[in-house]
Amino acid sequence: MTLVPLGDQAVLAYLPDEPAAVRFAAAVRAANPPWLHDVVPAYASAGVFFDADRARTSDVLRWLGALTVPATAAGPGRAFTVPVCYEMQLDGPRVCARTGLSADEVIRLHTATEYTVYAIGFVPGFPYLGYLPNELCGVPRLAAPRVRVEPGSVGLTGKQTGIYPLPRPGGWNLIGRTPLVLVDVADGFFPLRAGDRVRFERICEARYRELEGERLSRLQE
């Protein structure tokens, strides 16, 4: 692990891999030192934010360096199922052309994988999910991002997939859309967090209309 100051109120920890970053963040949260504001894992790193009135950067660096992190996670993150209507796509043909797969093969592979939330960012609540099956990897972003991507749009690029929770510009390849609400900023509703697991479930357009507007809450233990 490598620790470096990030301004005067945060420390950035670089870990060997993504699971190690999740374990590190969990260990910091569990210890809950009095100066801790938040710890945010993102891929193979984690930012530790602290109260500068309660601790100096050198103190935090020393504390983190001595922290005991379990070699294995106490338990996997929470598991969510996200229903997706793959007929509501905009870039399916492009993905098929780049991968050499049929539309049904793309959908089968996308829904057969359990993804981990490795980071939340870009816009509030956008989950970066990894990693795609090898057959779906390598599809580049659009040459020109769309001015508006509708909320619930499911996209992929490189070796990642993700869900646009809010209407924003975006350049990922859109292969479907979920009817569920993933973010409500005004209500503080952000159900997904780093370390959680996500599976996609194929639904028809009629089922999409039935579920439209419901919140993501189908948590599976």
Image (cartoon, rainbow, N blue to C red):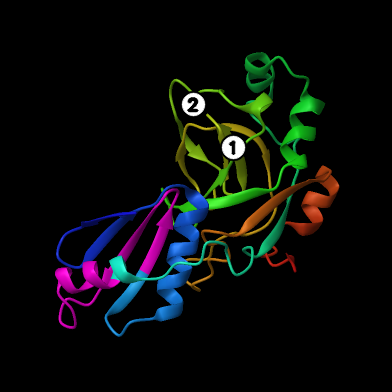
The answer to whether residue 149 is left or right of residue 98 is left
Task: Look at mark 2 in the image and give the residue it sits on.
Answer: 141
Residue 138 % position (x, y): 56, 23
Secondary element type, mark 1 = strand
Q: Quadrant of the C terminus?
A: bottom right
Q: CA distance from mark 2 to mark 1?
A: 10 Å
Q: Nearer the viewer, residue 82 or 47?
A: 47
**How would you rate the neighbour count of disc 1 (Cα within 10 Å): few for under 14, some for 14-19, many for 20 or more?**
many
Disc 1 marks which amino acid? Gly
Residue 179 % position (x, y): 70, 53
Q: Residue at x 67, y 53 (%)?
A: 198
- Magenta span includes 44: yes
Disc 2 marks which amino acid? Arg
Q: Nearer the viewer, residue 33 or 179?
A: 33
Check the image and report above or below for 186 versus 135: below
The answer to whether residue 217 is left or right of residue 142 is right
Secondary element type, mark 2 = loop
**How would you rate the neighbour count of disc 2 (Cα within 10 Å): few for under 14, some for 14-19, many for 20 or more?**
some
Tell me, yes or no, if residue 150 can be seen here. Answer: yes
Q: Disc count in the image?
A: 2
Tell me the magenta residue range. Answer: 39-63
Quadrant for residue 155, please give it.
top right
- Magenta span includes 40: yes
Residue 103 % position (x, y): 77, 24
Residue 90 % position (x, y): 64, 29
The answer to whether residue 137 is left or right of residue 147 is right
Quadrant for residue 108, please give it.
top right
Q: Residue at x 43, y 23 (%)?
A: 144
Tell me, yes or no, if residue 126 can be seen here. Answer: no
Which comes before the other along the chain, label 2 or label 1?
2
Q: Quadrant of the N terminus?
A: bottom left
Task: Look at mark 1 in the image and give the residue it sits on.
Answer: 155
